[in-house]
Structures are given as structure tokens and as C-alpha cells.
Amino acid sequence: MPKPRTPNGEKNLVSRQLIELRKQNHYSQRDLAYMLQLKGYDMDKNVITRIETNQRYVTDLELKALSQVFKVSYDYLIDGPGDDPQK
């Protein structure tokens, strides 16, 4: 069974937000990978690259890890800053 993709063929919904958050915080991909590893998540620079370039799906554990590092909600990672239905 084929894995789901967005209408644009993307493998994840967080790539744009991840790039933006990483740049806002002045983290390189290697810096981010190191921070994730310190929190106990097995993600290296190549994983970050593949997520940002939409070549890789993101697991729920990875989504949780990214939200912890950047101190943002899952919704923010998936939908971005302007799409919060609770506002």
C-alpha cells in the first residue's frame, strides 16, 4: 500500500516550518541534530536534511522531539503560525 502524500506530493507537512524555526534560532542542521541527540532522539544531520527537503516522512516521536526543542506546538509545526483554529 502506498504511503500518503500531500496534494503537492510532499512526504511531510513540517519541512517549511522546520527550516524557518531552525533559521530563526540560528541553528545549523548539525546543531539541531546534536540538540535532538542530547534529548535522547536518534536523529542525525542527514535525517534533518531529508525532512527539510521532503524526502522523508516524519514520525510522531520526531514531531514530539522537534516541538520540544523549539518549544512550539504540534499544530504550529504542521500548520504554521497563521492557521491556528483556536485563535
Image (tube, grey):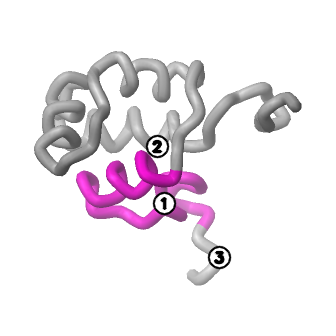
Could you give the CA–CA distance between mark 3 and mark 2, rounded to whole angstroms? Answer: 17 Å
The disc placed on residue 85 is 3
Relative to 20, say whether 56 is above or below: above
Residue 44 point in image, percent of width and height = 27, 25
- Of all residues shown, which one is farthest toward the right? 1
Q: Which residue is mark 2?
A: 17
Q: Which residues are magenta?
A: 60-83
Instruction: Please name the amino acid that badge 2 sits on.
Output: Gln
25 or 38, which is in the foreground? 38
Could you give the CA–CA distance between mark 2 and mark 1, rounded to whole angstroms? Answer: 8 Å
Kindly identify the residue that appears in the image at 48 percent across and 62 percent down. 74
The disc placed on residue 76 is 1
Residue 32 point in image, percent of width and height = 22, 34
> Dot 1: within a 10 Å radius of its alpha carbon, few (fewer than 14), some, or many (20 or more) residues?
some
Looking at the rendered image, the quarter that the N terminus falls into is top right
Dot placed on the residue nearer the N-terminal end, 1 or 3: 1
Task: Name the quadrant containing residue 57.
Answer: top right
Kindly identify the residue that appears in the image at 48 percent across and 28 percent down. 51
Kindly identify the residue that appears in the image at 28 percent across and 20 percent down. 45
Kindly identify the residue that appears in the image at 42 percent across and 66 percent down. 73
Dot placed on the residue nearer the N-terminal end, 3 or 2: 2
Instruction: Please name the amino acid that badge 3 sits on.
Output: Pro
Residue 36 point in image, percent of width and height = 22, 42
